[in-house]
Amino acid sequence: MNARKLFLNKRGQSMVELALITPLLLAALYVAADFGILFFAAQYTQSAVREAARIGSIMPDCVIDASVACVGTTNPPASCPGSATGLGTIVKEACDRLPNLITGQKVTVTLTGTYNPAICTREVKVTATGTYTYGLYRVMALMGMNVPTTTTVTRAADTRYQAQPVTVSGAC
């Protein structure tokens, strides 16, 4: 009779179930939070390149006046060492705005179109690239699971170049 009562006793069952399911629940929540942080970093990066493109659209062209901060000077700042090509002030503005969650940051800026002869469709394009490292996936990789531990975040923005000091004759 005592053995039967022992098998029917369910005290502590809930604690055992909770102990078994908690790690799985926490892992699922952490994966969702990690993707949320990645989404936030990507949106923050998009905002940074948009602001840098806006700033670059009103700066003078270095072909016209290289004595001032202009679109064309190459001076990658120390805060964004991966920026091999850049346009001084614009790269600095983009790098200052990029989130710290993105590593290996690289910012490139291009001014399309020509000054002489002038064309109607000049644009300033800013591109930022970096790597986001997942938190939980690194732990899963340590356990032998074949999962990617990083993802590349690339965002770009282009604006019409406003600082063109010439007039174009004819239709654009």
Image (tube, grey):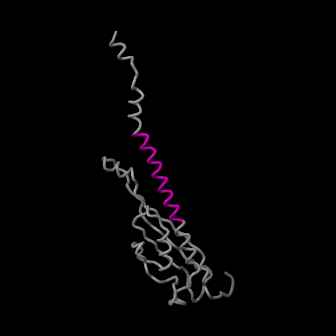
In this picture, residue 66 sits left or right of residue 58: left
Residue at the farthest top position: 1
Q: Quarter of the image holding residue 4?
A: top left
In this picture, residue 15 sits left or right of residue 69: left
In this picture, residue 121 sits left or right of residue 48: right
Residue 102 coordinates in the image, percent (x, y): 43, 63
Residue at the farthest right position: 171
Residue 146 coordinates in the image, percent (x, y): 34, 49
Residue 40 belongs to magenta span: yes
41 versus 142 height, above or below: below
- Residue at x 60% of width, y 76% of height: 160
**Which quarter of the rendering shows the C terminus?**
bottom right
Residue 168 belongs to magenta span: no
- Residue at x 44% of width, y 47% of height: 30
- Residue at x 69% of width, y 86% of height: 170
Q: What's drawn in magenta, residue-wise? A: 23-46
Magenta stretch, overall SS: helix
**Which quarter of the rendering shows the N terminus?**
top left
- Residue at x 53% of width, y 79% of height: 111
